[in-house]
Image (tube, rainbow, N blue to C red):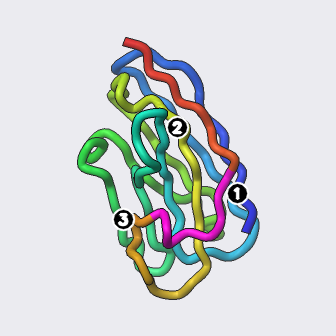
Amino acid sequence: VQLVESGGGLVQSGGSLRLSCTASGTYNHIGWFRQTPTKEREAVSCISRNDDRTYYADSVRGRFTISRDGAKRNTVYLQMNSLKPEDTGVYYCAADAKKGFVYGLESAEEYDYWGQGTLVTVSS
């Protein structure tokens, strides 16, 4: 599975961005992870392909929405609203093709395929 991300950039606090991740190949789970210089890579939002189960980090719930395009579901979006400076980081799209979970939908260890990352900078 190859993943190509886009949509990062610089935005003022309170603004919005939409990240896109296009997957070539079949996956079962896909999600967005965030990494900053001071924190380990953390799950922001993830979705399971088969049952549409979703995960949101507490810090983004109510502000971010994960979704997929039409029938093929090859593109996953992360709509980020009401952005805060603490949302700044490199956002990575990740996917996995395993059926079921070993570590959990929100665990980075669950995902075998990663995109190159896209930088999101939120200015105060």
Whether pointer 2 and pointer 3 mark residues with C-beta atoms closer than 8 Å, the reply is no
Q: Which mark is residue 18?
A: 2
Say which label, 1 or 3, has the lower sequence index: 1
State the SS at label 1: strand
Q: Which mark is residue 3?
A: 1
Name the one closer to the observer, 60 or 38.
38
How far, Cα to Cα, is label 2 from label 1? 16 Å
Q: Amino acid at mark 3?
A: Thr
Q: Residues within 10 Å of mark 1 (few under 14, many from 20)?
A: many
State the SS at label 3: strand
Task: Give the magenta-colored segment's residue range.
Answer: 108-115
Q: Amino acid at mark 1?
A: Leu
**Residue placed under numbered mark 3 in the picture:** 54
Quarter of the figure that contains the C terminus: top left
Q: Position of residue 48 (x, y in %)?
A: 45, 72
How far, Cα to Cα, is label 2 from label 3? 17 Å
Residue 109 belongs to the span the image colors magenta: yes
Say which label, 2 or 3, has the lower sequence index: 2
- Picture layout, residue 7 above or below residue 100: above
Q: Residues within 10 Å of mark 2 (few under 14, many from 20)?
A: some
Q: Position of residue 23 (x, y in %)?
A: 69, 62
Q: Residues within 10 Å of mark 3 (few under 14, many from 20)?
A: some
Q: Residue at x 36, y 43 (%)?
A: 64
